[in-house]
Image (spheres, grey):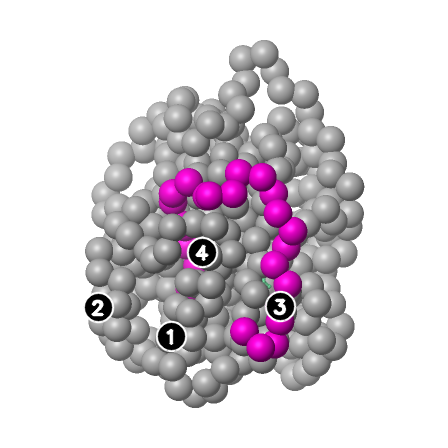
Amino acid sequence: MVQGCEKLHANQLTASRAPEVSYQSSPTLAGNVLADFRFSSNPSPQEDARVFEVALATLAGDAHEIWTVEGEVVSGHEGDLRWSRGGGWLFCALEADERIQGGPEGAARHAYATLARFLRQQPECHVQRLWNYLGGINRGEGDDERYKHFCHGRAEGMGDWLASGFPAATAIGHHAGEHLLQVYLLAGSSPGRRVENPRQVSAWEYPRQYGRTSPSFSRATLLCTGDALAISGTASVIGHATAHEGLVLAQLDETLRNLDALLASGSMPAGFDGHSPLKVYVRHRDHAALIHDSLAKRLPGVPLLLLHGDICRADLLLEIDGWRYGQSSTAVPTVVEQYSPQV
Ligand code: 3EB
């Protein structure tokens, strides 16, 4: 069931264009900036609600990720939440402390329940994309791995909030202290379209071996404006299994194949261009140069930001998320692509 949003006010915009995402070295915080992300292994809360320090160190690329929208942005704080809105879009971010909320599970439950309560009252209540950063993501064995506790708390905190279709997401491990959970999102005034990858089992249908609660995300979201695909964290996973364990370049190849398949599944133009920024999460610092050089050759001109982070499966060495702009050739929502093992 799609949750009802607050009515649009007469002077409120319905989004007509996707937020423009770019990497910049020293941006000015203009009035049309919805969010300004900085990356730091020692993040601190910033006064301006649009500025958010992600708890990951940069390995290569410019220092800021900037989202701009059409029109003036207003922003504020509500409890532990920070938000900004403009051009029909809403940015919202939350930091939770596991020491207060009860570990990764309690912190995720709290974060998602808080976001759900807030979003329900906003005209832009349709979540299109979510990012999650938690510490020590691979610590703990089997069902006790911290990522799996996070997945359980996230699903409980979501409740029926996103039951009509999980948005695209990223979940990455940071090194800034285990107690810090960071969650932020992009929401719009009408629903986006969920896109799955025919080469991969949908994450919410992963078999039991990956945890008692399946991860709640889709592989990508075609934004409600139809002009951009928001791509989830994508890794070397075929079906539900990790491919090329221990082989960083083979994992990179497989990840790029998955990204190509996603673009096709979302009816977006093939390939990436100078307007399609990608974020690359790298588990081992020593792999950064190799990954960067290989990507720069294979995706010339594509803006890249390499970040030092752990992937949610201990055998994955890298993950890529990002944006593909361009008009989708299917304006009308289609059925989710199903995984078939022969692909
Ligand atoms: C995978 O394909 C890799 O739990 O939100 C990618 C993107 C992954 C998002 C999440 C996890 C998440 O299963 C892991």
The residue at 54%/49% (across/down) is 221
The residue at 42%/63% (across/down) is 260
- Asked whether residue 335 is drawn in magenta, I would say yes
Residue ID for mark 4: 263
- Compared across the picture, whether 33 is left or right of 96 comes to left
Whether ligand 1 has any atom under 8 Å from the Cβ at mark 4 is answered as no
Residue 101: x and y, percent?
Answer: 69, 57
Residue ID for mark 3: 339
> Are the residues flagged by discs 2 and 1 in contact, CB closer than 8 Å?
no
- Asked whether residue 262 is drawn in magenta, I would say no
26 over 147 or under it: above or below: above
- Compared across the picture, whether 113 is left or right of 35 comes to right
Dot placed on the residue nearer the N-terminal end, 3 or 2:
2
For badge 1, the amino acid type reads: Leu
- Which marked residue is nearer to the observer: mark 3 or mark 1? 3
Give the Cα distance between marks 2 and 1.
13 Å
Residue ID for mark 1: 252
Give the Cα distance between marks 3 and 1.
21 Å
At mark 3, the secondary structure is loop
The span picked out in magenta is 320-343
Residue ID for mark 2: 297
Whether ligand 1 has any atom under 8 Å from the Cβ at mark 1 is answered as no
Give the Cα distance between marks 3 and 2.
30 Å
Give the Cα distance between marks 4 and 3.
15 Å
